[in-house]
Image (tube, helix red, strand yellow):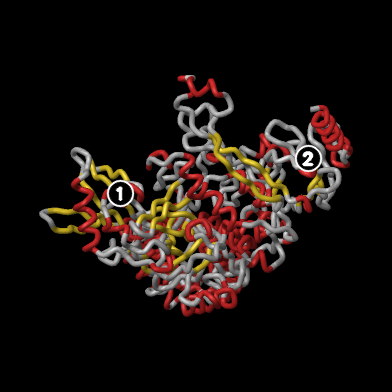
Amino acid sequence: MAATGFLPLLLGGHPHGYSLLLHGGGAAVYMASLGLIVILWSGRQDLSLAMKLTLFILLWSGLVTAGTMVLAMTSLVATDGQRLLIAIHRWMSIPTAFAGILFCLMWLVQNRSKPIQEGVNP
Amino acid sequence: MKGWCLLTFVSLFVAATSPVARASDSSSHVPLSNSRSPYVHIITLFDEEGRAINPSRGQTTPFSMEATCARCHDVSAISKGFHFNANHIDQEPGRPGEPWILNDIQTGTQIPVSYRGWEGTWRPADLGMSDNEFVRMFGRHLPGGGPGKPNPHVPGSAEGFNDVFEIDCMVCHTSPQGVYNFNDRRRFAEAGQFRSIIISGSGLGHAEYSEEDPRSADPLAMFDPALEDEEVDAIVKFIYNRQKVDTNDRVFFPITRAVSNDSCYQCHTSIQHEPDMTNHGWKHDKDVHILAGMQCVDCHSHGIDHRMVRGFEGESSNPFISSLSCQGCHYGVETDDGLQFAGRMGAPIPGHEGIPPIHFEVMSCTSCHSGPMPDDTTVFFQTSMAHSLGFAEFVRGNLATPKINAPIFIKGHDGKIAPHKIMWPAFWGWLSEGEIQPILPDDVKTQTGRVLTQRPRTRDKFEPLGDETILEALNHLQRRAPENSQAVYIAAGTIRTVQDDDLVVEFTDLVQPYVWAMAHDVRPAGMALGARGCQECHTADSPFLTGLSTPSGPIAGAVGATQSMLSLMGLNERLHHLWATAFMGRPTFKLFAIILLGLFLLGAFAVSLSILRMVGNRFQQ
């Protein structure tokens, strides 16, 4: 999502064509997956406090990122409002992306350390 | 002589002490009335030398429109205005606009011509046309000045002129209460009697021409070798209508400062051609701005320099001028002091609710709001300048040339998609070393005998050129072809040549179609493209993207390749179909997204409570 959304911006353009199609098509899957992961994992007792806080940030920034775009697609807001919502969408997607990456890294670290603890110090 | 001097003095005194003069701003060298009410122009006439004319005493000296108006207005500045500066060397060409079209029914010629050097047009000189020939051909709609006034510094520019075509202020500034006779204007222009245009146009009388040999004035001059090649000059007399002259030798000009729409339409009418034109006006609304009570000149405005605002985006860095574009007026102009001018002249600020802003970055306002609604194919358009609209003589059939089609959607000067008009040049020419030099219609007729001259001459009897006629004419031309040149006929994106006694028709890109942006008539929001939903454009068969543009011209045979709007816009056809397919499920997608978002939100609250509780517990511990 970040690649199809940010890459065209970094290249001086805006998402369009195939990249926008991919971005828009993947958005629904992304939202559903993120919602499911957050809801299912938030109850897990094996997550550290840091991971839970990261999940909290991921949850709310993801919600704002998705919500602003869904709202912009409706006929409720005019051009200026849409521009504002799209700007929020873009800016909020940065913490969302970072929180997602951070959470994944922490999860990987946690899962790598478990077998070592179990194997070396029975 | 004394009488003339006295009259001149009196006239000058009257002019100098007139109310306009008295209202003069001390900071300006010209008098101003500074009122929104138009100044009543009851004024003295002046000749080219600036001498007052006394028509009531039988004086027949031609009055000069420029000299008369220059008493109070800066005619020098006006003469550099947009309508007069096309042939000025230092003039930037600007965005391509409607060209003059050299149209000849008999020879099937339609060549876009412009002094401005717009890409895809020919300059008159490139075609071998003198300024005089140009002015005679198009003087019916030229406001005077420009090529109508030979430039003494340009060799040959005076060729053919025995009369000067001054700027005719009244062609635009006649008030709705006045009358301007365009039929006479065309007749006089074609005859090269340009001063007649000035006097008959302003309704002050008529001109009489006689020819006088300059040598007859002096018998000895007959033997002067220097005068041997002197051309015979036309002697012009103005027969003033005495009823139009008051007791002080002044005349009334029904002038309006804000030019009326009808004056603009005289040269700038552009209508969609339909088989039944008698019902055209009833079935087509006017531009939404006109219906709202605006005038053309409210947006296409200018100062005394007559540098007309054309009204397209990016025309000027001056915010005030930029505010006279669609975007500038309806949204405002971003300046150092913030957004300014939004809502000028009562312009509503559009909401465009639900339309993704990307549309405004890649498309012009006119794409959705101007011209006819896109259809499966383009339609024929006729314009005043191209089809002599406004003159009663011609019956303009559906086939009448020049062929102008619209709307085609292509990227404009600013890279945004916009509706354009398009015409494919058609002409006879010489092909040499990959370049084609058009031949002027009169020369074609001379060189092809009766092959083309026996064809109908007028639009009402127009017949498309058949391949047999083209073959015969090309054979005639080839016999007179310059060295290493081949006679060709170009039309509708094709080139016709003779090879082994047979006519060969091929597609060609040696001559490109000429396109220019169209902005009117503007449709209201409710009739804009997309007002009925995204599917107006985002479907597999939407005319906006899949409508077809077929080259047209004055021919009966094969024409160039048909292109879709997608192809003209340079868009990917496969992507469009994929995109259109995606839009089939867009309403469902939106609903799904909203439901998902709602669930997500509920879940988020629940999760947040759980996390916050956990964090709280940690802090308590």
- Mark with earlier residue (2, 1): 2
The residue mark sitting in front, 2 or 1, is 2
Q: Is residue A121 visible?
A: no
Name which residue lies at 66% across and 39% down: B78
Name which residue lies at 35% across and 70% down: B577
Q: Can residue B270 be seen in this view?
A: yes
Indicate whether B516 appears above or below B315: below
Query: The numbered mark 2 sits on a residue in which chain?
Result: B
Q: Is mark 2 on a helix, strand or loop?
A: loop
Residue A15 picture quarter:
bottom left
Residue A115 position within the rendered picture, expressed as x and y whole percent measured from the top left: 33, 60
Name which residue lies at 66% across and 45% down: B319
Give the residue at mark 2: B54
Give the residue at mark 1: B446
Q: What element carries label 1?
A: helix
Q: Tell me the quarter of the image containing the N terminus of chain B.
A: top right
* Farthest left residue in view: B500
Viewer-side residue, B180 vs A103: B180
Three-letter amino acid code at the position of disc 2: Asn
* Farthest front residue in view: B219
Label 2 to label 1: alpha-carbon separation: 49 Å
Q: Tell me the quarter of the image containing the C terminus of chain B.
A: bottom right
Residue B7 position within the rendered picture, expressed as x and y whole percent measured from the top left: 83, 34
